[in-house]
Image: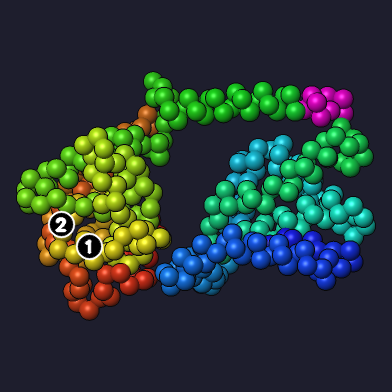
């Protein structure tokens, strides 16, 4: 929407269109398509807008330019060097031709890419930006990148060795080889080849969590739900591999710790937290952190000592460990005057975000 408005305002012909019904009818259609999101947010205290606007604005308390540099480096890797250079060239040529672009093609590409890329850069000055966030902004730059390679004179003349057809052919073969090697590296254990613990066998972690849940259920004679440490990654992996249907846990009983304590992104909208009151839980975490255990004791009648659940060793010798903690009876009211469960921005939710 903002890109379309900038495009219309960028020359006299576009501004004249604002006096006609077409753009305003398009706006009504866009609002109608977007209305389910608006209605849902209105029924849930505008949680999505508060998260994306108020929370992001609160992060700009100090500048960390290194985040922006890391994001740009991530774009270089994600897009590949060739595409990154082409998109940078598209920006350069588009801005040079912006004022004298009668056809509007260059202005269209710049106007639709500029707002979101500017947001990503601004956010990157104070907080981390995920490398995939900028991808929608590149849609309008793709045609420009093709034009740069096809139309002579827009970029410095390449040598015969680096003509577009030759460059594209070499690039495609290189990417096929690289992607095949990465896929092989991630999915297939290769003897004597170092492999980081990031690529943990999540199905094995989930099976270990299932065994811990069964053990705790036998011990307490009550079916527990699963609380996963962190913001959402561990909870998502466990929920995927512990789906109901083949003897596994119902994925709706797997939630991140922030959702229990009043956070956890939008997980709190998947559940009515009150339904878990009085139930036992198995807390699964990859951090043996006494602070988290101490906080759990504020919300459960009793918390058992951590037990090693699963460990995964990489070829580099690094060991990734997961623990489980039996938690007895989730209380609706926390001890020692802490905020009640379900209230936003609990300290444990902040702790989970830092994970």
| Crowd around label 1: few <14 · some 14–19 · many ≥20 (10 Å) | few
| Residue depicted at x 17% and y 68% | 331
Q: From this viewpoint, which residue is outermost toward the top? A: 191
- In the picture of the structure, the residue carrying the numbered disc 2 is 280
- Labels 1 and 2 touching (C-beta < 8 A): no
Of helix, strand and loop, which one carries label 2? loop
Left or right: 133, with 202 as reference point: right
Residue 245 visible, this orientation = yes
Image quadrant occupied by the C terminus = bottom left
Above or below residue 305? Residue 143 is above
- In the picture of the structure, the residue carrying the numbered disc 1 is 275
| Residue depicted at x 60% and y 41% | 78
Above or below residue 208? Residue 50 is below
Q: Position of residue 40 (x, y in %)?
A: 46, 65
Above or below residue 204? Residue 327 is below
Image quadrant occupied by the N terminus = bottom right
Q: Position of residue 343 (x, y in %)?
A: 32, 72
Using the numbered discs, state the Cα–Cα distance from disc 1 to disc 2 in whole angstroms. 12 Å
Query: Residue 165 in magenta?
Result: yes
Disc nearest the viewer among 1 and 2: 1
Q: Which residues are magenta?
A: 159-167
| Residue depicted at x 40% and y 36% | 199
């Amino acid at each position: 929407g903002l890109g379309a408005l900038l495009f219309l305002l960028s020359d006299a012909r576009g501004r004249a269109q604002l006096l006609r019904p077409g753009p305003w009818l398009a706006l009504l259609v866009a609002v109608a398509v977007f209305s389910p999101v608006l209605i849902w947010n209105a029924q849930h205290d505008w949680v999505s807008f508060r998260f994306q606007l108020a929370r992001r604005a609160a992060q700009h308390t100090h500048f960390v330019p290194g985040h922006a540099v890391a994001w740009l480096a991530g774009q270089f890797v994600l897009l590949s060097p060739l595409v990154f250079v082409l998109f940078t060239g598209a920006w350069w040529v588009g801005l040079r031709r912006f004022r004298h672009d009668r056809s509007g093609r260059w202005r269209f590409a710049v106007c639709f890419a500029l707002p979101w890329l500017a947001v990503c850069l601004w956010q990157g000055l104070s907080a981390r930006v995920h490398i995939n966030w900028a991808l929608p902004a590149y849609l309008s730059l793709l045609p420009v990148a093709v034009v740069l390679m096809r139309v002579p004179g827009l970029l410095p003349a390449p040598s015969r060795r680096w003509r577009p057809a030759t460059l594209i052919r070499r690039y495609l073969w290189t990417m096929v080889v690289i992607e095949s090697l990465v896929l092989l590296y991630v999915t297939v254990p290769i003897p004597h080849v170092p492999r980081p613990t990031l690529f943990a066998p999540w199905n094995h972690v989930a099976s270990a969590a299932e065994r811990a849940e069964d053990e705790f259920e036998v011990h307490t004679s009550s079916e527990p739900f699963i609380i996963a440490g962190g913001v959402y990654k561990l909870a998502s992996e466990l929920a995927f591999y512990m789906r109901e249907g083949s003897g596994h846990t119902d994925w709706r009983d797997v939630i991140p710790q922030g959702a229990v304590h009043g956070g956890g992104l939008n997980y709190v909208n998947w559940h009515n937290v009150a339904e878990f009151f009085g139930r036992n839980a198995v807390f699964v975490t990859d951090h043996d952190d006494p602070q988290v255990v101490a906080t759990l004791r504020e919300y459960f009648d009793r918390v058992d000592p951590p037990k090693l659940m699963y460990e995964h060793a990489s070829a580099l010798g690094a060991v990734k460990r997961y623990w489980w903690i039996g938690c007895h009876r989730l209380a609706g009211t926390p001890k020692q005057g802490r905020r009640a469960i379900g209230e936003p921005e609990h300290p444990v939710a902040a702790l989970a975000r830092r994970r």
